[in-house]
Image: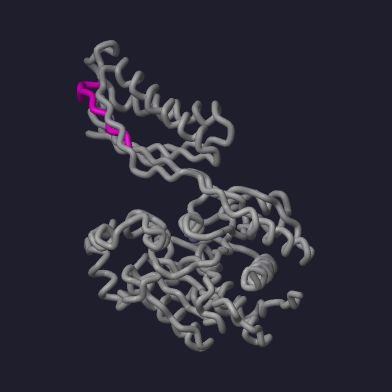
Amino acid sequence: MKKSLTINASRLHQRIQDMGKIGALPGGGVCRLALSKEDQTARDLFKQWCQDLHLKVLIDAVGNMLGVQEGSQPELPMVVTGSHLDSVATGGLFDGPLGVLAGLEALQTLQENGYDFKRSLAIANFTNEEGARFTPDMMGSLYIKKGISQQEIYAAQSIQAPHVSFESALQRIGYQGKNKLQDLPFHSFVELHIEQGPILEQENITIGVVEKVQGIYWTEFHLKGVANHAGTTPMHLRHDAGYVAAEIATLARKISQQFAGQVATVGMMQFSPNLINVVPQEVVFTVDLRNTNHDLLEQAYQSLITQAQELANKEGVTLVAKSLVQFAPVDFDAGIIDKVEHNAQNLGYTTRRMPSGAGHDAQMMAAICPTSMIFVPSVAGISHNVKEFTHPAHIEAGTNVLLGVIQELLEE
Ligand SMILES: [Zn+2]
């Protein structure tokens, strides 16, 4: 029988606050870009906490960290939990650190209660989950699933000036390790994360039981027309790249209404020459398409490309569509989904099954071992924002669910 344990909420709260001081911004929130000085300090603190709990700290060639509580039967595949300590440039205290520090808290609770570890339990801090300094995002977990080579990662250049390679930034912070985390036997992975959306709060639900992650397609469009005088060029003689860009943006919205569960966003658009009295010659813009259903996502994408081409042809504008990212939706493990749900319900928390709208390390881990996630509510659905907040009671609830799930996984 599983002993019913509960975490120390004030200790967890204190660790979240302490971590939030690293890279703290004057008005609240944090800036802790991957492999920055601040990321280094956050890693140092995490490492210190791991060592305080007598965990073995493993670091791989791209800086992924694992704090391992070794079990008495180390040949058994290990249970892993965790998330990331990097942030976007104006991030909050919870996106990422919650998963890492809740894992640490669950592990410490087990230790304090004299839990007899047979299987090992590891807490992960994945490198560059956000992709705010180096692309692609979820880089560290993508590397563990062998979806990207070390060479490719090392060559990545920072988005911000002064431009540095991933390799030199990693060496500078001293987190280029020798452990081969890719080759470790993983039993399972479970990640606690804030929802980063409004659904749980709106429905007054404490625990989101995450069944899947939406598929994501990013496409960059490059339109080329002819710059001309805005006053003297008759409308029927124009090759207006700006007009076509606007039509495609409208098309993206229409497509989102044609396919169930489809969302579409035009988040970036750059005009050239970008002048009030000149017909636009060139426009570069992006379309972000997401759906939990892969077939529908693929249909939406094909429909977008075909109709965008027709719109460009009509105006005599050339169109080049470049695919930047195509991640298929990921289904989580039915067994761990059930564990999340019944642990939450046994603790008396309200639950709701839901997909994740955002990408997470868990979607990469799902390729190598049974995986799922636990969501807790984000106040007003706000994230990637200094105002990001989750109530302490929800953090405590989510971490207790995590603890229960980890215990069951360790017993398998
Ligand atoms: Zn995150």
Quadrant of residue 231 within the rendered picture: top left
Relative side of 179 to 317, left or right: right
- In the rendered structure, which segment of residues is drawn in magenta? 220-230
**Residue drawn 67% across and 61% down?**
340
**Residue drawn 22% across and 15% down?**
232
Pinpoint residue 194: horizontal percent, then vertical percent.
58, 60
**Residue drawn 28% across and 56% down?**
159
Give yes or no for residue 236 being in the magenta stretch: no
Of residues 222 and 335, the one nearer the viewer is: 335
- Residue 232 drawn above or below residue 401: above
Of residues 274 and 221, the one nearer the viewer is: 221
Question: Which colour assignment does the render follow?
Answer: one colour
Give yes or no for residue 225 being in the magenta stretch: yes
**Residue drawn 25% across and 67% down?**
167
- Quadrant showing the C terminus: bottom right
Q: Total number of numbered labels?
A: 0
Q: Main SS of the magenta segment?
A: strand
Pinpoint residue 383: horizontal percent, then vertical percent.
53, 56
- Residue 162 drawn above or below residue 199: below
Pinpoint residue 247: horizontal percent, then vertical percent.
40, 24
**Can the viewer see residue 16 in this picture?**
no
- Residue 214 drawn above or below residue 38: above
Quadrant of residue 131 within the rendered picture: bottom left
**Can the viewer see residue 59 in this picture?**
yes
Relative side of 13 to 315, left or right: right
- Quadrant showing the N terminus: bottom right
Relative side of 281 to 405, left or right: left
Pinpoint residue 216: horizontal percent, then vertical percent.
45, 43
Relative side of 131 to 111, left or right: left
